[in-house]
Image: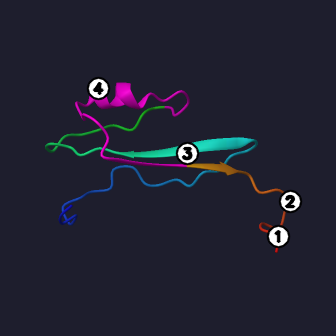
Amino acid sequence: MGDNTNCQEVVCYEGPRPSMGIHRIVFVLFRQMGRQTVYAPGWRQNFNTKDFAEAYNLGSPVAAVYFNCHRESGFGGRRR
């Protein structure tokens, strides 16, 4: 892929903190063809990746990862 020393974090990672139920988490990676500002969406509910990519002329994703998460039950964290 190349050297990433010129990369700049724009939005810091926030780990999932679901309050209830199972949540689907998707990370999608796009290759930008040049320097441009891409703004984080104001909300995440019903986020549309295709619309986001079109708004910033990003083209197709180059990678993606998906996982499910849920809140751990109890007060003591993980049980062994």
The residue at which mark 4 appears reads as 55
Quadrant of the rendered image containing residue 61: top left
Pointer 2 residue:
74
Q: What number is the disc on residue 79? A: 1
Question: Quick one: label 1, few (<14), some, or many (20+) residues within 10 Å?
Answer: few
Q: Secondary structure at mark 4?
A: helix
Q: Given the current orientation, which residue lies at the most extreme left position?
A: 34
* Circles 1 and 2: CB atoms closer than 8 Å: yes
Mark nearer the N terminus (1 vs 3): 3
Residue ID at (24%, 40%)? 37
Q: Which residue is denoted by mark 3 in the rendering? A: 25
In the rendered view of the protein, which quadrant contains the C terminus? bottom right
Q: Which residue is outermost to the bottom?
A: 80
The earlier-in-sequence mark between 2 and 3 is 3
Instruction: Specify start and end residues of the magenta stretch as a single range.
Output: 43-66
Mark 1 → mark 2, Cα distance in angstroms: 9 Å
Give the mark nearer the N terminus: 4 vs 1. 4
Left or right of 6? Residue 44 is: right
Residue 59's label in the rendered image is none
Q: Is residue 22 above or below residue 41?
A: below
